Structure formats: C-alpha cells, structure tokens
Image (spheres, grey):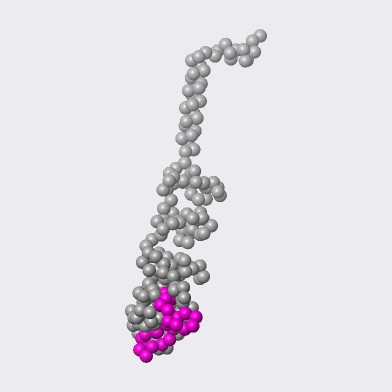
C-alpha cells in the first residue's frame, strides 16, 4: 500500500515546485516589508555601545555640529595630527602656551633681541679694529687709528648703566675678523658725555693696540 511520502512524490511536478517557490518568495518579501524600519526610527538608544566604527562613517560625514562643545580632548587627537593649517589665524595666545615650554630657540631674531632688552642688556656692540660697527645697536663708534681708543655713542643717557667689554672676533662682511694677536687688555669706562662709553684695547704692557671687541651695556 503506497505511503504518504510515495503519494506526495507522485503528485510533484515542475509546475508544482515552481509555484511553491514563488509563493515562498512572495511571502518572504511581504514579511521583510512588514518588518522594515520606519525612517528616523533608530536612535542612540537602539545602537549598541562601540557598534559604530570608522568603517560605518562616511568621509566628511562628521562636522562641527556633530561634536559636543569640549567633546574632543587630547586623547582623541593623534600625535602630530594638528599642524598650522588646522589652526585659525591668531588662535594661539599666551593662554594656550604652558609656562616654561618656550625657549630662546623658539623665538625669532627680533624676539630674542626684545627679550635681551627686557633682561636688562640695553646695548650690544660689536666693533672691528678700525672702529666699524659689526653688529649691535650703538648709534656710532668713533676711533682714531692706532690709538686703541673707541668712543661708543649709545644715543641716550647711560650714566647709570654698567659696562662689560671683551676681546673677540666679529663679523666683518662675509668674513670673521679675529681680535689682534697682540691684544690682551680691554676696558670699558664712562665718558664725560653721559650717552657714550669709552673702550680701550691694549697689549699686555698697556701699549695701545687696535682690536676687534664686544661691548655689553646693562641699564
């Protein structure tokens, strides 16, 4: 006597199978449509913690409006990721610089000059043996050849200042002029003119010798 399975096999045909598959797909599609999510129905409460990663975020999708005020901290910024192009003009002021982090090497030449003035070195003078200005901010240097005497005009009252002169090489154009080989002594003294300092250079016996020198005046 034929079994239930045998009777079912006898009734199977291509048309029957095709119809059954079509019905299954139709019902499946209807079921999917029935559970499709409405627009804007997924919020933060429906997203698992750490479920959204970089691969889920479109390029340029996150702008300023998506970031909470004070929401980005140092731990969120990759080392060396922020450069000059990321900073707004004049965005960094003294409030953004930690105390003690800037050194002299971080300043421009003009900044170092201004800092030196604040530290009390009001005048810096470099002179060639011939009395030519080789750097610094003196108004003028007067010198008579072979006298070993240089009158440095500072341009303002320096009678309450202190002076320090040293023998040393100075830049003379593209070259460096060394101090005179015979020079051993150098002194800096006040002049009768309150705005000037007199520098003398000599050999070991005190005989005048013209030589390059440096002068610092602290006021």
Report the residue that reaches farthest toward the bottom: 192
Q: Is residue 128 above or below residue 106?
A: below
Report the residue that reaches farthest toward the right: 1
Which region shows up in magenta? 188-214
> Does residue 142 appear anywhere in the picture?
yes
User: Could you say where residue 212 lies in the image, as x and y percent from the top left?
Assistant: 42, 74
Report the residue that reaches farthest toward the top: 1
Magenta span has 64? no
State the residue in front, 185 or 63: 185
Quarter holding the C terminus is bottom left
Question: In the shown orientation, is residue 117 left or right of residue 2?
Answer: left
Magenta span has 208? yes
State the residue in front, 120 or 101: 120
Residue at 47% from the left image edge and 41% from the top image edge: 37
Which image quadrant is residue 65 in? bottom left
Question: In the shown orientation, is residue 157 left or right of residue 50?
Answer: left
Which image quadrant is residue 39 in? top left
User: Could you say where residue 73 lies in the image, as x and y percent from the top left?
Assistant: 51, 59
Residue at 60% from the left image edge and 12% from the top image edge: 7
> Does residue 93 appear anywhere in the picture?
no
State the residue in front, 128 or 113: 128
User: Could you say where residue 78 lies in the image, as x and y percent from the top left?
Assistant: 51, 54
User: Could you say where residue 129 lies in the image, as x and y percent from the top left?
Assistant: 39, 75
State the residue in front, 186 or 88: 186
């Amino acid at each position: 006597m034929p079994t239930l399975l045998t009777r079912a096999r006898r009734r199977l045909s291509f048309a029957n199978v095709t119809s059954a598959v079509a019905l299954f797909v139709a019902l499946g599609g209807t079921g999917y449509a029935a559970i499709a999510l409405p627009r804007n129905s997924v919020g933060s409460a429906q997203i698992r913690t750490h479920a959204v990663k970089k691969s889920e975020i479109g390029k340029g999708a996150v702008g300023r409006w998506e970031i909470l005020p004070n929401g980005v901290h140092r731990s969120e910024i990759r080392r060396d990721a922020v450069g000059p192009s990321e900073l707004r003009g004049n965005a960094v002021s003294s409030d953004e610089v930690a105390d003690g982090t800037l050194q002299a090497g971080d300043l421009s030449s003009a900044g170092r000059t201004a800092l030196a003035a604040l530290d009390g070195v009001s005048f810096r003078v470099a002179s060639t043996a011939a009395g030519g200005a080789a750097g610094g901010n003196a108004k003028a240097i007067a010198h008579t050849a072979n006298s070993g005497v240089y009158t440095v005009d500072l341009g303002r009252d320096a009678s309450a200042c202190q002076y320090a002169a040293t023998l040393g090489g100075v830049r003379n154009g593209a070259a460096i002029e060394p101090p005179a080989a015979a020079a051993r002594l150098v002194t800096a003294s006040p002049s009768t003119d309150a705005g000037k300092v007199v520098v003398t250079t000599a050999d070991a016996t005190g005989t005048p010798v013209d030589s390059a020198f440096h002068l610092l005046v602290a006021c």
